[in-house]
Every structure is written in structure tokens, then in C-alpha cells.
Amino acid sequence: MKEIGIVISNPDAPSTRRLSFVVKKGEVVRRGQFVQIETEEGLMVGRVSDVIKTNRYFSRPESVERYESSQSMKDIFPVDNWEYLNAEVIPLGIYRKDENIFSDVSIPPSPGTKVFEANPELLKRFLGMDENGLEIGDIPHHNVKVTLNMTRLLQKHLAILAISGAGKSYLVSVLAEELLKRRKEDGQVGIVIVDVHGEYTSFASDPEYAGKVNIIEGKDIKIGLSKLSTQQISEFLPKLSNVQVRELSRFLHNLKEEKSHYSLEELIKLVESDGKIKSSTKDVLITILTDLMNTELFDLSDNPPVADIVKQGVLSIIDLSSFIDNRKKQMVVAHLAREMFNYRRENKIPPFLLILEEAHQFVPETARAENAISRGIIQTIAREGRKFHASLCLVSQRPIQLSTTALSQCNTHIILRVTNPYDLDHIGRSSEGITKDVLNQISGLRVGTGLIVGEAVNYPIFVRIRKRMSKESGKGIPLEQAAKRFAEESKRIIEDAKSFM
């Protein structure tokens, strides 16, 4: 491997927590790069946390100011010969060649030890890459692809966090591509994306993926009333009193004894005709049941059935972009998530990945019960889903508004650019393995670059997201392009109208 520097001695380094090396003349070292150093324990792997330029001639400001006021110091002194690059390194671990294992650093390298670029094959093993894993991208400054083991990435849930426009949906599309291209013998899961903006529907118009994609529009989704228990209906109506719940249970029981399928309209008529219930309770029940009926979400049976939504090797996109009412979105997600989880527990559907875009809308941290209808079941899947191979991916631009219960159960985080200081602080406290130097880099990440931390990797790594293969959605085009497209379409409409006349 190429030698790039030599370990130097500082008052408090080299230590097991940090060290510095002077960069060899002519070599380039960048922040985030991985290096390897021989130690008494074995081969140490570290990450460059910062790079500092020093020059003794420019170390005293009063001297610099005095000389530069009359003549350039470069004309007086050989300043170029005294410029050095110092790189600061965070030691990550030790590879013991004789035992073929990795361990923690307990002895620092000696000053004067040579520093080398990290060997790509060693780096793959050290970071936990899987040759048959999901290819997300590559590691900056190294010829190493980021291929993540599917089980490690998804079984204990995944969170994708970033500000708007930082590439969250792009990354989800890359992840979906990787899952769709897996063969049966590699292990396929059912993929369900709750798409609140219609950003993923372009998969269906891409010839490469169209046969593996199922688009379910919000207007076509129906919840079968007959399958719902009193408790499940009450979750849609969290303000019901105990008396109202008890009376509702009685009416449902009476209906179920008469018929296997019934509608909200039939339930309302039964309430209206009942002579036992107090008028005040009757009025409230009729009002709230009418409100449910007006959502147009309820029917005699589920449409589509959950078994048609979750299929191995198939991407089902729940397109809720036509829904404005957040309560309506939450009701759909709550019912769908509960059905998926229950069916998975009974092994009636294959292992699945449920991806929630704008997850803070569906599993908020502080919202009241009536504004968090889907929170309970999402938190249940977050806590118990891994035992049944029911996986979650929470995608959010506001991690601080996400349920701490749900986010803490996501054992892998992929963090793209985040600038809000409250969100950064929340990420730092909820993501294990993020050091201060890594956290400081998150706000400056470029679009398309992210940090992976947690179960999927042995150590936090930065990744450049690979180029997606599928057709991109028109929803994410630049403002200028959208304005031009609108002008062109308007012009075409006018010209068509003139030709028709």
C-alpha cells in the first residue's frame, strides 16, 4: 500500500483515542479518508477527522504583519519549504492477522511509525461490507463499494433522515432497486412504500421495473368495516367516552349476529332506530359515524386485500398524494400497517419492508391522540417487528418530531444533510456511534452524500449514493425546469385550441 505519512508526537497523542501524522510531500490526504498503521497489537485502521496546514514562518502574526507590509515573505524566506500538512486520526480498531479477528485499540502506535492508505479488501472486511449485499454507493476517497447485508440493514429497522431536497427519496429509490433485483434464491421481501407526494409512481412507467410494481391510488383504498373490532374503530375515534365505546360495541355485536358484511350506513341506521340508548349518546355516535362515512374510506371489505399488496419481490406504492387531510392518511396507514403486521405474525404474507415517507406525520412524538392515529401500531412494529421479519424504514426531514420510541428502535440510520441544530442534537443523542467530529460534518454534506451508522456497518461510514437506474419522478425537477415545462404546455394548449377553431 502507498505510504502517505509518519505518526508524530503531540503533548496528548498518539493515544488510543486520537493521533496525528505529517503528510508525506506530494501526497494528498482528505478528511474522512481511512488509513492503516502497524502497531504492537496488529494493523490499526483509523479515519482522518481533520487536515491542518502549518508553516513556522506564519506562526507569529506580528512578524507576518511587519514583513508583509513592506515585501512578500515568499520573496524573503523559503516559506514553501516549511509548509506541512498534518492529519488528525480517530483510531477505530485493530486487525489481528494471526487470529484473523478485529478488536478495539488498547495500545497506540509509536511516533515515527509509517502511515499507509487503507487496503480496500481490508476496509471491506473491517467495515462489514457484504459482497452479496445491497449496493448503496461507494466510500469517498476509496475504491470500495458500500454493499450492505440486507438482514443487518433492515431486520432491526432503518431510519433515513435529512432536510428537504437532500436526497432522501433518491436514496429510497436506490434501496428499492436493490431489493427488486434480488433473486428468489438470495431472499426477496415484499416492499411497500407509503408515498405522500407521488414521488415513486415513476417506477410503474419504467420498462425495467413495471412488471414488479403495483400502484395503489388513495381513492381506491377501502377499509372493510366488518373486519374491525370496537377497539380498532375506537382508535379512529380517540375522543369516544367509555359509555360511547360500550354502546358502539353493542351495536357492532348485533350487526355481526345478523350478517357477515355490513356498511357504516347500516350501522348508523341501527343506532338511529335503537330505543335503549340515551339521546345524548345517540347524537354523538351518529355524528362521529357520519363523519367516518364522509371520509369515503369504509366499505364492506378491504380493497385491495393485504395479501395482494405484500408479495415477494414486488414493490407496492400506496399513493396518497391526492389526500389533503392528514387524519385520512393516518387512518389508511394505521389500518394497512396493522393488517400487514397481523398477517405477517400468522405467516400469511412474506417478510416485508414498510417504508414511511414523511414519517413524522404518521408517528409523531408529541401530537395528541386524535392527531396520531397511526402512532400506536407503528411503534408496535418498531418494538416487535424484528421477531416476525416485519421491517420499518422511517423517512423524515424532522427527526426531532419523530416518536423517540420508534426512532430508537431503528438500529441503522442513514443521515444525509441536516442543518437544523435541534435535529442535529437529536440525531447525536439517538444515533449510537456518532462522534463529535462526524456530527459536525453532517450539516456540510453535499446532496447525494450520507452517513451510515448503526447495525448495518461495523463503524460509521460516509457514502456517496450511487446513481439510480430507474426513471426519475417529475415531482423533484428543478424550479426553472418546472416553470419552462408549464410554459410549454400552456403554449401547446393555446395552439391546439386555435387549430380546433
Image: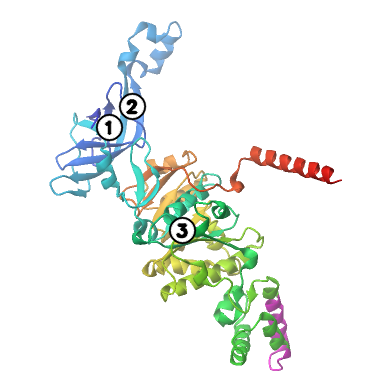
**Could you say where residue 443 lies in the image, as x and y percent from the top left?**
48, 41
* Callout 2 secondary element: loop
Which of pointers 2 and 3 lies earlier in the amino acid sequence?
A: 2
Taking depth in this image into account, of 252 and 303 the one nearest to the observer is: 303
Q: Is 391 contained in the magenta span?
A: no
In which image quadrant can residue 114 be found?
A: top left
Mark 3: amino acid? Cys
- The residue tagged 3 is 393
Rounded to the nearest angstrom, the CA distance separating label 2 from label 1 is 15 Å
Q: Is residue 387 above or below residue 183?
A: below
Three-letter amino acid code of the residue under disc 1: Ser
The part of the image, by quadrant, that contains residue 497 is: top right
Residue 455 position within the rendered picture, expressed as x and y whole percent measured from the top left: 34, 55
In the drawing, what numbered circle is on residue 28?
A: 2
Q: Which region of the structure is painted magenta?
A: 273-290
* Rendered location of residue 364, percent (x, y): 54, 61
First in sequence: mark 1 or mark 3?
1
Mark 3: few/some/many CA within 10 Å (<14, 14-19, 20+): many
Residue 238 shows up from this direction: no
Q: Is residue 275 magenta?
A: yes
